[in-house]
Image (spheres, rainbow, N blue to C red):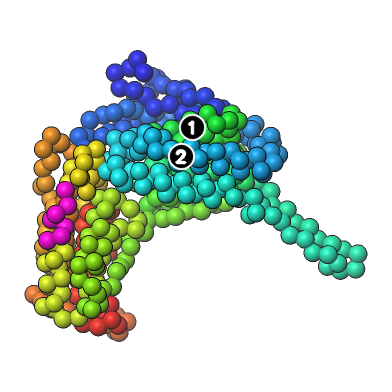
Amino acid sequence: SNHSVPVVANLINGRFQLPQNFGSDSSSKIPIIDPSSNVVLSHIHDNHTADLQAAVASAEEAFPTWSNTPVQSRQRLLADFAHLLHEKHVREEIAYWITLEQGKTMGDAMGDVWRGLEVVEAAGRAGRDMLGDSLQNLANGLDTISYRVPLGVCAGIAPFNFPAMIPLWMFPLALATGNTYVLKPTEKAPSASLLLAKHLHDLGLPPGVLNIIQGAKPTVDGIVTHPGIRAISFVGSNQAGEYIHDVGSRHGKRVQANLGAKNHATVMMNDADRDSTVKAVVGAAFGAAGQRCMALSVLILVGDLEESQSWMEQLVEEAMKLKVGNGFVEGVDVGPLISKDAKTRAESIIQQSIDQGATCMLDGRGVVVKGYETGNFLAPTVISLNQQQHYITHSTDSNAKPLSNPAYTEEIFAPVLTILTVPTLEDA
């Protein structure tokens, strides 16, 4: 780009192009920020109308030819795509942009691409899922035959926490089964999706089969109401997912919405192997800075209070060994949170939980990373809900209030582990 801060392109009809409103409306400009430093890396533009219309029109135009392309040919292209993603230097390039824009460590970013690659491999075998059914002599002189046929233009709306894996959950399977696609990657880390699309086009994907449109909520609004889009896939928060499912369904679209998921919770008995369990819990709670739906956010210990205290102390000791820092630095275990807002929200929930009686056994707030003092860092944090060494017990009283501490009820999406101890497995 000739501009001091680059503008992220759309991919429409096989060509990368700047937004049609580029330069005309500064209010639609959204910065993409390095979460390790809060330096602005680039911008996207979020005035969706003209660009989204062009992307959907391109997908509609490409659909008749692509849907009539033999399934073996579509599978072969995706098999070539999977083969390319097996090249380490290709995955490293994609992982570089994930770490730069999203903040996760390079190891996590490489895993992000690899998990997506596994879905591409599955898409390369999608032909058997296209088989229909037949039944002879359903009635006198009547046979039935059914076919599985592509829907048309499909769309995907992807979250920030897995910039490669989740888009690869979406468009490869849609393309393998003969659909064309419009993808809206996360506005916080869009470059991985663009690189994936570039590689697929370099392998021979016809123009218009896969289009990528940048944007935030106005673009989402355009997708869920556009009459040319037949189906939508979404992964993200409860609030956004419920909105997309509701509005998209009311506009006649098939919508699959995978909403926010608090991994609630792991129950640990007191006869578990101490060393291996502690390492597993620490990795599950604080890996990827807790920004994944499978992050372990609540641990329920069962058994003696004194022994549980010993478990918690060992968990804290192990968590303190984790290195917090920039994801490109070797040896870093926990990268930054995605934004200042995410950090502020997590720290607020920690404080609310303390104010409501929880004990902060390990406080990760205020951590300073040398050279990245302005980054969105929160070190591993451990919160205990057992007040004054008393059990938390289960009540069969239908009028009893559930445990309401926000560390227990909220999906914090940060490196925060909440622990409570109960006397029996039934209580757990």
Residue 318 on the magenta segment: yes
Q: Is residue 111 left or right of residue 273?
A: right
Q: Which residue is mark 2?
A: 85
The residue tagged with tag 1: helix, strand or loop? Answer: helix
Residue range in magenta is 317-323
Residue 298 on the magenta segment: no
Q: Is residue 190 left or right of residue 403?
A: right
Q: Is residue 270 left or right of residue 230?
A: left
Give the x, y percent position of residue 282: 22, 60
Residue at 31% across, 32% down: 32
Specify the amino acid type for callout 2: Leu
Vertical arrangement, residue 221 with respect to residue 58, above or below? below
Q: Which residue is mark 1?
A: 199
Farthest right residue in view: 141
Viewer-closest of 358 and 382: 382
The residue tagged with tag 2: helix, strand or loop? Answer: helix
Q: Residues within 10 Å of mark 2 (few under 14, many from 20)?
A: many
Vertical arrangement, residue 173 with respect to residue 193, above or below? below
